[in-house]
Image: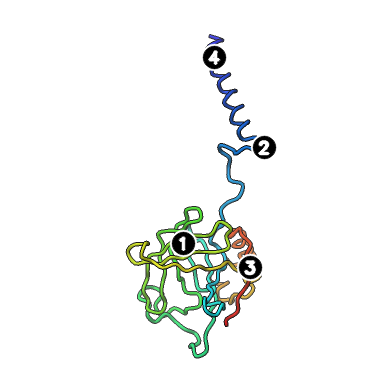
């Protein structure tokens, strides 16, 4: 009986030794917990005009009960653009809502670096499209894809993460509506969730 019970114990020691050896210095680990969590979409992003290089708009992403939402956090109006724009063309609860602060992206479900099953609003005509997003591994860029029917026939846009200093430029309306009651603590919290410091410059409108 002693010999029989010793065999499993010896086998277990051998397995532990092999796993430890393979995971030793200079060798790839078979299974190790991730040291760093993948960067999240939470935080501030900007869309760049490809022709002028200026910023088109800023977008703030927050997490609400497991779903991710992106709102228009800052507008860069062009000469002749009306002030205090609203979404007159919207056909849902966002109808006649001010464009500044309007939820643009809704219902995104996170799967690592990918966000799926969400939707995106085109405030120009009120149409709502299916959407998916992908954060780059370094957390510096966000690929946003809106589509109708099949993702294959959609169109990509690339947004860029803004530095932490950009939070201080947000309108108080955005802070009050989308960040918790304590604004400084909320900003610190959302920056920690984003987990990646931006290396992208803040672009002014051109």
Q: Position of residue 23 (x, y in %)?
A: 62, 35
Which badge, 2 or 1, is on the more N-terminal residue? 2
Which badge, 3 or 4, is on the more N-terminal residue? 4
- Location of mark 2 (residue): 25
Q: Residue at x 59, y 28 (%)?
A: 18
How far apart are the two marked residues, 1 and 3, measured between alpha carbons? 20 Å
> Which mark is on residue 133?
1
Between circles 2 and 1, the one closer to the viewer is 2
Between circles 3 and 4, the one closer to the viewer is 3
* Quarter of image, res 46: bottom right
- Location of mark 4 (residue): 5
Few, some or many C-alpha atoms within 10 Å of disc 2 (few <14, some 14-19, many ≥20)?
A: few
Q: Residue furthest bottom?
A: 80
Which badge, 1 or 3, is on the more N-terminal residue? 1
* Front-lying residue, 136 or 73: 136
Few, some or many C-alpha atoms within 10 Å of disc 3 (few <14, some 14-19, many ≥20)?
A: some
Which badge, 1 or 4, is on the more N-terminal residue? 4
Q: Residue at x 43, y 62 (%)?
A: 132
Q: Up-down: is 20 above or below 184?
A: above
- Location of mark 3 (residue): 163
Which badge, 4 or 2, is on the more N-terminal residue? 4
Question: Do the CB atoms of the residues marked 1 and 3 lie less than 8 Å apart?
Answer: no
């Amino acid at each position: 009986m002693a010999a029989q019970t010793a065999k499993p114990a010896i086998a277990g020691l051998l397995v532990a030794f092999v796993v430890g050896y393979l995971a030793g210095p200079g060798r790839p680990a078979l299974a190790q917990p991730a040291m760093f969590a993948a960067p999240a979409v939470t935080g501030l992003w900007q869309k760049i005009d490809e022709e002028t290089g200026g910023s088109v708009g800023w977008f703030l992403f927050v997490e609400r009960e497991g779903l991710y939402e992106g709102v228009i956090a800052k507008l860069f109006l062009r000469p002749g653009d009306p002030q205090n724009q609203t979404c007159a063309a919207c056909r849902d609860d966002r109808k006649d809502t001010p464009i500044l602060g309007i939820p643009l992206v809704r219902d995104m479900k996170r799967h690592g670096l990918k966000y799926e099953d969400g939707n995106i609003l085109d405030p120009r005509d009120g149409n709502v499209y299916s959407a998916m997003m992908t954060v780059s591994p370094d957390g510096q860029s966000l690929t946003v894809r809106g589509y109708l029917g099949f993702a294959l026939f959609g169109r990509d846009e690339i947004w860029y993460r803004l530095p932490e200093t950009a939070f201080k430029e947000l309108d108080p309306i955005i802070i009050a509506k989308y960040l918790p009651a304590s604004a400084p603590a909320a900003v610190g919290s959302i920056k920690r969730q984003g987990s990646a410091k931006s290396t992208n410059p803040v672009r002014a409108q051109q």
